[in-house]
Amino acid sequence: MPISASWRAGAAGLALAAAALSAFGPALGQERPESILPPGFGEPAATPTPRPTATPRAVPSAAPTAAPTTGFVQPLPPPVPSPTASASPTATPTATPTIDRAVLAEYEMPSYARRSLDLVGPAGPREGALTADAFGSADGRYLEELMRRLSAPLPSRWLSILLRRTVAAQLATPARVNGADFAAERAWLLLRMGEADAARAVVQSVDTANYTPKLYEVALNAMLAAGDPAGLCPLANGGSGATGEPGWLLAQAMCAGLSGDQARAKQLTVAARRQRAASGIDLQLAQKVMGAGPDGGQAVTIEWDAVDQLTIWRFGIALATGVAVPDTLMATVGPQVNLWRAVSPGVPLATRVEPAEAAAAQGVLSNAALVDLYGALDEDNDASGAATTVSQDLRTAYAAATGSDRLTALRTIWGGDATTRPPYARLVLTAHAAARIRPRADVAEADRLIASMLSAGLDRTASRWRGLVPAGSDGWAMLELADPDITERLSYSDLASYSGSGDAALKQRMLFAGLAALGRLAPDDVERAASALDVRIGATNVWTQALDRAVRDQQPGTVVVLAAMGMQTGSWKGVPPAQLYRIVSSLRAVGLGGEARMIAAEAIARA
């Protein structure tokens, strides 16, 4: 499905294929995502629909057509005379009733059930999302461009969670953009973050009558990433008409098959083949979906031998139909695709373990979701021995009678000795089990226990270890950053005493950046430490000026997006300490102090 190259930019590793998934990187001044359907989806035979211009513009909602002055109920016809014996009855033709479209629209979607484009999104503050006015008076075109530039996934679990809570919120549509187009930008960013379910929820927050070509394109990608071809059915006819893309023809065929209209499904399949919209495995996968409907009557075997690239179409339909994608093809795609698999019920539990751990480290999955997955593996006969062992150790870590047995089980889950850094996903997995260990001074794994608890936000539980961990250790540093009840400030000598594990110089600079941003370092020592550690927290550039403006205008949503822009790197080691300072201090200044503390502590755990 060739789509404008406009959404291409800055995230080459996102490509599912050279000509297909490369669109997951954003580009400047462009309107629609590049298609990630296979190259075989050729140009439509009809004249293509004109593309939107490069400069986004607000599109006003269409005003409802005024109802006519005549009533909806048609007048009754005059009585027909009774037939007599001498006269045969004569049929009297009646006028064809006229139906007003505005009245019909009321019956299809009553006005009280329609959703405004002024407020779009699936989650509110009760679900942990930011408030509707999170972007304040920020210009919508500016926000769209920021989101389009943003490379994802991010190195920080906590900033990723905060970014999801921002762009998946029920937000007031900013000025100068159309609400549906703004929802498309948000969903596109969520897809690049690996948040397929959240992206689907955002596009479904817009009534189909209000869809724009851009939103149709993103919705197609979101439904496929979530492995939900049935989600395309309310959109297929409108998407075909609005975009002219032949991929929607196959979507119409699949939806006809799912609804039991196999004759129409076959007719549309023939049309798709005639128009060269799809062939080979792409058509076979669509036919497999059609066969799942009533009276499908066809069993399709999928062979991957001749396939050398994975596209979003192939991935999404395979996910929906339970067709396993070969590891060789999965190895060619970006990390987002693996995160999509983590939340798909169509992926067997045993296969879901590795993507689920990656998703937990990224913030896509919570501690509770990862624990539930390992709990379910106990009853899965197909689970590997290693996964089953972790599941059994996790049960022991929660339920063993003694603290020493629970701690032994945690050591086994983490692997290695006390000085080896475990995979961060395993720290997320054990967060609540770690909280059950009684604090005491002789626990060699105190640093791991604290990092594990903080990975799930258990800051007050972790703070019970204050005074029991050695000063200058990683555990001590994380508590100085994460404890919500600290009132006293550290001195330069306290900071200098920290050596940390691993890259000691980097972690000391990260600790300084976090303490200074949280106001937990004596003011007289901030400048001294900045000079000694060469962390130029006072330097300014376009990014810092944008953050300062967003803080001044109290726009937490804008601050979150800009903070994510400051972490355009693959790992924590690539995050400059000066930028960590700006991120943490800005989040704290707009009322996101809890998240700011967690991000600062995460830097110590993962840098």
Image (cartoon, helix red, strand yellow):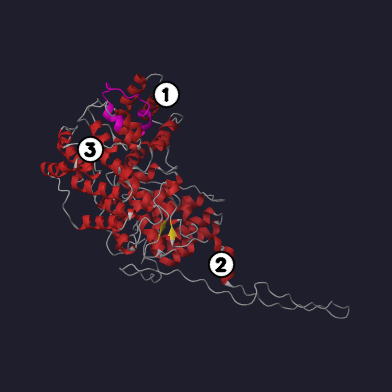
Q: Position of residue 463 (x, y in %)?
A: 31, 32
Q: Amino acid at mark 3?
A: Arg
Find the magenta span and give its range.
429-450
In which quadrant will I find the N terminus?
Answer: bottom left
Q: Decide which of tag 2 and tag 1 comes sooner along the chain.
A: 2
Choose top left, top right, bottom left or bottom right for residue 474: top left
Mark-to-mark CA distance, 3 and 2: 64 Å
Mark 3 secondary-structure assignment = loop
Q: Which mark is residue 489?
A: 3
Q: Are marks 2 and 1 in contact (CB under 8 Å)?
A: no
Q: Around disc 1, counting alpha carbons within 10 Å, would you say few (fewer than 14), some (14 to 19), or many (20 or more)?
A: some
Q: Decide which of tag 3 and tag 1 comes sooner along the chain.
A: 1
Q: Is residue 65 magenta?
A: no
Which residue is denoted by mark 1 in the rendering? 399
Choose top left, top right, bottom left or bottom right for residue 30: bottom left
Which residue is denoted by mark 2 in the rendering? 105
- The residue shown at (46%, 48%) is 300
